[in-house]
């Protein structure tokens, strides 16, 4: 059975629907645009698509604020179009994973609206976390939890009570102790499984269950935090797994889990729970052989405990694009986007490293993710004028956090003029985030397609080889003597990957060269370059 579990070795492409392709010319990406561009994804050679939320949403957090879990936002299209997309993708051999956001909904969700109307003490409020405030007149939040987007995790309603939101105030947290919330999400799972989706990406997987009594975090010296990774969350995913497994076909869950302790991380990945989870430690790792080696070894060891496949992620819709991260003098992860904003970026260097990183991650055991535009070598757009920024992390921090808009800029497809085919000619509106750099003219899918040295060609070749090469995807890895400059490992059947993260060329081991991320210097691998070989 194992060998046919597609998700163990899949390359999964993340679509951020708003910014992928605009079919109807209103400036917002949509399902019509995505359907028209499926050919690009099939030709690229990925196995599945993960679509960031497409549900009805006021877009206070780019769709991670869901007002109706069973319908498509009109800006993106209709349920019929979603169904057609699933069929068309399947016909091209592409599976579809949808994003499920169970920790919170939108303040516009009818159940939250009903709770607001019903007033303090009403049973409708039990579906969320409503509390009285502290202080003499209840003017202080019920506890000290911070929102991930800045400020307290509590907002006050007109009637003076407070509700919990771990993210924006427009995203009230569900109360997962309530049986109706549990039943509702089982029903939502079935709704999309019935429509034919192949799996779910679960947003903030570890946040659903909160510690009893919602205690203050200050003085809370034990792990985990009171708002995450509580023991009780596992029982929820076991109930989800039963539903998923009752459907034919091989469907899968992928957890979004910012958990750095590999063993706690692996507890979500069990045969009766979730199948895979994103590997954020790799994404956070600086460009250094020993740092990568440490993450790779820890990841593989933790996943081996539970026989789950590892995943490898370089960028997503929340993080600074890795061409930019790797092009800075200091490549460690930018938790503090504000501090790093405006630091010099060497895009040529970042691009070279991104190419090498692609070959590294696609050669590692398990499954890999490609965020839309990774295959084109897009960089973070850092100089977005303030009045165009939309991300709540920007708004809520009062403009201190630069926000996540820079990795969400509309994709460049073709043509010489902006928006480079993102919207059709004669569109009725400019793109929702109209800031594509001029330099992307050379990075359109069209411009890169015929060029044997382009980023896109490298991705296409690597994905083709990955499909054809036995021993890639899930399976064992064997290290050769790596140094603090070089990663050098074999997979089965004589496949070998060497990555030079140092500053001097290194000799290549003997074997047939299958693919290199950049030009070689005679028999040597230059700095910031990776090569795939077939050992003699
Ligand atoms: O992200 C969860 C998460 O932890 C991020 O908020 C991360 O801390 C932040 O982006 C760093 O700036 C998920 C989604 O991927 C994200 O887009 C949503 O905003 C968030 O959940 C809330 O749904």
Image (spheres, helix red, strand yellow):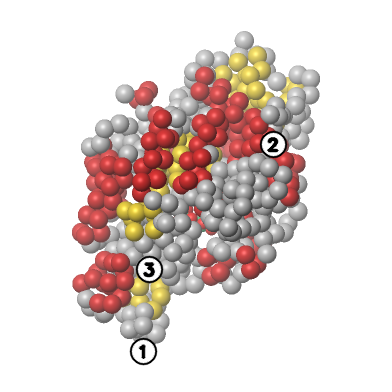
Which is closer to the viewer, label 2 or label 1? 2
- Residue neighbourhood size for the residue with mark 1, other residues' Cα within 10 Å, grouped as few (<14), some (14–19), many (≥20): few
For the residues marked 1 and 3, what is the alpha-carbon distance in whole angstroms?
28 Å
Side (left or right) of 202 relative to 187: right
Q: Earlier in the sequence, mark 2 or mark 1?
A: 1
Residue 82 location in percent, x, y?
39, 45
- Relative to the observer, which residue lies in front, 416 or 127? 416
For the residues marked 3 and 2, what is the alpha-carbon distance in whole angstroms?
43 Å
Question: Which of the 4 image quarters holds residue 134?
Answer: bottom left
Residue 414 location in percent, x, y?
65, 41
Name the residue at 51% across, 68% down: 150
Instruction: Decide: is 503 above or below 62.
Output: above
Number of marks drawn: 3
Q: Earlier in the sequence, mark 3 or mark 2?
A: 3
Name the residue at 60% across, 37% down: 375
Instruction: Decide: is 203 above or below 504.
Output: below
- Residue neighbourhood size for the residue with mark 3, other residues' Cα within 10 Å, grouped as few (<14), some (14–19), many (≥20): many
According to the picture, the residue beneath numbered tag 2 turns out to be 447
According to the picture, the residue beneath numbered tag 1 turns out to be 136
Q: Secondary structure at mark 1?
A: loop
Q: Residue 393 — which label?
A: none
Name the residue at 28% across, 67% down: 111
Residue 517 location in percent, x, y?
68, 29
Question: Which of the 4 image quarters holds residue 106?
Answer: bottom left
- Residue neighbourhood size for the residue with mark 2, other residues' Cα within 10 Å, grouped as few (<14), some (14–19), many (≥20): some
Q: Secondary structure at mark 3?
A: loop
Which is closer to the viewer, label 1 or label 3? 3
Side (left or right) of 328 relative to 180: right
Instruction: Decide: is 8 above or below 414.
Output: above
Q: Residue 107 — which label?
A: 3
Residue 499 location in percent, x, y?
65, 30
């Amino acid at each position: 059975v194992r060998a046919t579990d597609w998700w163990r070795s899949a390359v999964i492409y993340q679509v951020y629907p708003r910014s992928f392709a605009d079919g109807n010319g209103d400036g917002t990406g949509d399902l019509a645009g995505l359907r028209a561009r499926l050919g690009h994804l099939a030709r690229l050679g990925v196995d599945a698509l993960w679509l960031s939320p497409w549900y009805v949403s006021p877009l206070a957090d780019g769709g991670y604020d869901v007002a109706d879990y069973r319908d498509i936002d009109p800006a993106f299209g209709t349920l019929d179009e979603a169904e057609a997309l699933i069929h068309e993708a399947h016909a091209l051999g592409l599976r579809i994973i949808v994003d499920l956001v169970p920790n919170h909904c939108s303040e516009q969700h009818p159940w939250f609206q009903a709770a607001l109307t019903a007033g303090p003490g009403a049973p409708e409020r039990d579906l969320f976390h409503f509390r009285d405030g502290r202080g003499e007149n209840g003017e202080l939040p019920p506890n000290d939890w911070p929102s991930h987007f800045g400020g307290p995790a509590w907002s006050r309603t007109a009637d003076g009570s407070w509700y919990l939101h771990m993210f924006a105030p427009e995203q009230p947290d569900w109360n997962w102790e309530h049986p109706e919330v549990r039943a509702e999400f089982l029903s939502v799972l079935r709704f999309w499984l019935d429509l034919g989706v192949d799996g779910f990406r679960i947003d903030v997987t570890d946040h659903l269950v909160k510690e009893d009594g919602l205690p203050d975090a200050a003085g809370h010296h034990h792990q985990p935090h009171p708002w995450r990774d509580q023991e009780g969350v596992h029982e929820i995913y076991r109930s989800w797994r039963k539903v998923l497994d009752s459907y034919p076909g091989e469907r899968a869950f992928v957890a979004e889990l910012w958990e750095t302790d590999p063993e706690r991380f692996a507890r979500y990945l069990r045969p009766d729970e979730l199948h895979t989870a994103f590997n954020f430690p790799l994404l956070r790792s600086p460009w250094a052989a020993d740092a990568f080696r440490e993450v790779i070894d820890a990841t593989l060891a933790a996943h081996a405990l539970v026989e789950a496949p590892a995943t490898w992620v370089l960028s997503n819709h929340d993080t600074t694009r890795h061409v930019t991260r790797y092009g800075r003098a200091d490549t460690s992860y930018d938790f503090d986007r504000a501090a790093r904003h405006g630091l010099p970026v060497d895009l040529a260097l970042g691009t070279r490293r991104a190419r090498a990183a692609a070959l590294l991650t696609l050669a590692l055991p398990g499954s890999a993710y490609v965020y839309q535009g990774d295959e084109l070598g897009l960089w973070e757009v850092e100089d977005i004028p303030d009045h165009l920024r939309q991300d709540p992390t920007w708004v809520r921090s009062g403009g201190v956090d630069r926000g996540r808009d820079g990795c969400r800029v509309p994709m460049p497809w073709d043509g010489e003029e902006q928006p480079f085919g993102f919207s059709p000619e004669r569109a009725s509106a400019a793109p929702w985030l109209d800031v594509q750099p001029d330099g992307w003219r050379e990075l359109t899918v069209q411009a890169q397609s015929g060029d044997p040295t382009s980023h896109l060609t490298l991705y296409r070749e690597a994905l083709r080889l990955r499909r054809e090469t036995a021993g890639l995807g899930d399976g064992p890895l064997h290290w050769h003597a790596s140094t603090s400059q070089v990663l050098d490992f074999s997979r089965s059947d004589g496949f070998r990957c060497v990555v030079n993260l140092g500053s001097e060329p290194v000799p290549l081991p003997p074997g047939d060269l299958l693919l290199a991320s950049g030009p070689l210097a005679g028999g040597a691998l230059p700095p910031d370059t990776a090569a795939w070989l077939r050992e003699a």
